[in-house]
Amino acid sequence: MSVAPRELARTTFVVLVLGGLIAASLWIVKPFLPSLVWAAMIVIATWPLLLRLQRRLWGRRWLAVSVMTLALLLTFVVPLSLAIAAAVGNAGQIVAWAKSLATMSLPQPPQWVESLPIAGEAIASAWRDLAAAGWQELAKRAAPYADVGLRWLAGELGDAGLIVVQLLLTVLLCAILYAEGEAAAARLRRFGVRLAGARGEAAVGLAGKAVRAVALGVVVTALVQALAGGLGLLLAGVPFAGVLTALMFVLAVAQIGAVPVLACAVIWLWWGGEAGVAVALLVWSIFVGALDNVLRPILIRQGADLPLLLIFAGVIGGIIGFGLIGIFVGPVVLAVAYTLLEDWMNDEARRG
């Protein structure tokens, strides 16, 4: 059956108008999308906590929303403001400490390093080469990598004032979503049903479970690792322990881990002649690194029954593809796609 030219032109025009409206709408809300995505992820991950808090506050939603909003402010905005103030107030000390690195020299490796099994001789040889090269040569070798890292960090974080504004906007959107969470969830479910029927509704629920799994498994594990590592740095007397703790949290969320920062602190202590403290921090660093392999799988399984490899690939790929927001976006996309694919492949078996 052929389509009349008039109807074809009308359908094409309607599709173009709808596409233009969608594109224009996305362009208008583009400045708010990062904060909105973060707010949605935070609310989904902490929704059970809000409901428990509401039950304890005589069933008053506004009281629970107020407490959760205040908690978010204390968790995100206040520490960031204090960190910025501390960095500005200690800028001179940080610059002086960075300049003092040029006068430091790497000592020769101790005897026990060479006696390590399998890789001991190779580690000792590389250590001696680094000690012979000197700090200036090491800085020259590391300069390209440091430049790339700083460019990436500057591109992701941007201006400090913009970060504070985005965090405040995120907290405000979280308060709105906390207050209207059921209505927003109902709209999403209706959209899923309209899009793909029962499978679409199931995909919406699965996306929420994936977000909660990432929040429990990745973020909570990173927070525990960062706090444990920061405690070790504080007790060892390493300067700027608070800044290094924040750096460990970011690295742990990015699936790099807190061990690189702790390893640098161990080497710094060894250079300073505090061998005993360096060994103690090394033992603590091994314990902090092992937390990742024990705590994260347990927490992820509590959030959603999804393959761990799927979650890890989603986190790493999401960060590479979308930046920091990809921490949640990546696993959600992979989890929904994986489940829909599994359901489609098993559909024929269920019919038989």
Image (spheres, rainbow, N blue to C red):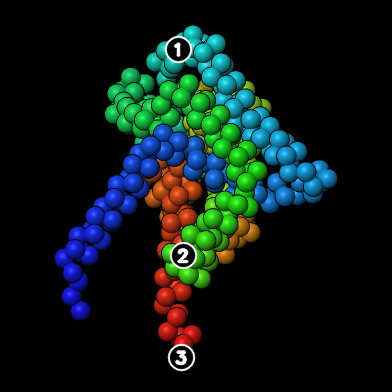
Mark 2 falls on what kind of element?
A: helix
Q: Nearer the viewer, mark 2 or mark 3?
A: 2
Location of residue 86 in the rendering, given as x and y in whole percent from the top left corner: 57, 16
Residue placed at 45% from the left, 12% from the top? 95
Q: Up-down: is 52 above or below 350? A: above
Residue situated in front as seen by the camera: 79 or 229? 79
Amino acid carrying mark 3 in the image: Gly
Q: Check residue 197 in the rendering and tell me which mark sits there, or answer none.
A: none
Quadrant containing the N terminus in the rendered view: bottom left
Mark 2 vs 3: CB contact within 8 A: no
Residue placed at 42% from the left, 12% from the top? 99
In the image: residue 63, left or right of residue 107:
right
Mark 3 falls on what kind of element?
A: loop
> Can you name the residue that lies furthest to the left here?
5
Location of residue 257 in the rendering, given as x and y in whole percent from the top left corner: 50, 42
**Which is nearer the N-term, disc 1 or disc 3?**
1
Residue matched to label 3 = 352
**Which is nearer the N-term, disc 2 or disc 3?**
2
Mark 1 falls on what kind of element?
A: helix
Graded by Cα atoms within 10 Å as few (under 14), some (14 to 19) or many (20 or more), the crowding at tag 2 reads few
> Can you name the residue that lies furthest to the bottom here?
352
Q: Check residue 95 in the rendering and tell me which mark sits there, or answer none.
A: 1
Residue matched to label 2 = 194
Residue situated in front as seen by the camera: 240 or 69? 69
Q: Up-down: is 21 above or below 304? A: above
What whole-number distance in Å separates the C-alpha atoms at marks 1 and 3? Answer: 71 Å
